[in-house]
Image (tube, helix red, strand yellow):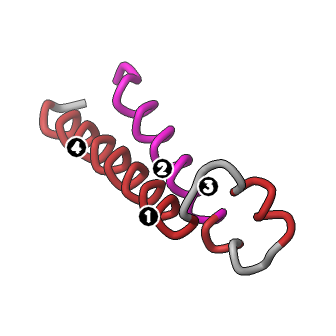
Amino acid sequence: MGRRSKLKMKMTALALIIVGVGLFYWAHQMSGTFDLEPIRSFNSTETHGVSILYFIGAISFVVGVYSLIKKW
């Protein structure tokens, strides 16, 4: 792999981390609290979107961190 492609991969990984944190923060702002979110996500359909944002944010963050620390 060339030097430019490694730089692009690192920048993509950092972007995924930033997007993941941003989505997680947005979901937190929509829900208002971390405490009852898992309980409310099973009982109400209006918090379904918040749960999806939490999930996508977490996946994006994990993929970004994995891509950043993986040896290319």
Q: Residue 7 appears in which quarter of the rendering?
A: top left
Q: Which residue position holds label 4?
A: 11
Disc 4 secondary structure class = helix
Nearest to the eye among marks 4 and 3: give it.
Answer: 3
Q: Which residue is mark 3?
A: 55
The answer to which of 69 and 58 lies nearer the viewer is 58
Please give left or right for residue 24 compared with residue 53 in the image: left
Instruction: Quadrant for the N terminus, please.
Output: top left
- At 34% from the left and 24% from the top, the residue drawn is 72
Q: Earlier in the sequence, mark 4 or mark 1?
A: 4
CA–CA distance between discs 4 and 3? 22 Å
Q: Please state which of the two labelled residues, at mark 3 or mark 2, is closer to the viewer.
A: 3
Task: Tell me the CA gap for discs 3 and 1.
Answer: 12 Å
Query: Which residue carries the number 1 mark?
Result: 26
Q: Disc 2 vs disc 1: which is toward the camera? A: 1
Distance between the alpha carbons at the discs numbered 4 and 2: 14 Å
On the image, the x and y values in percent for residue 46 come to 71, 80
Q: Which residues are magenta?
A: 51-72
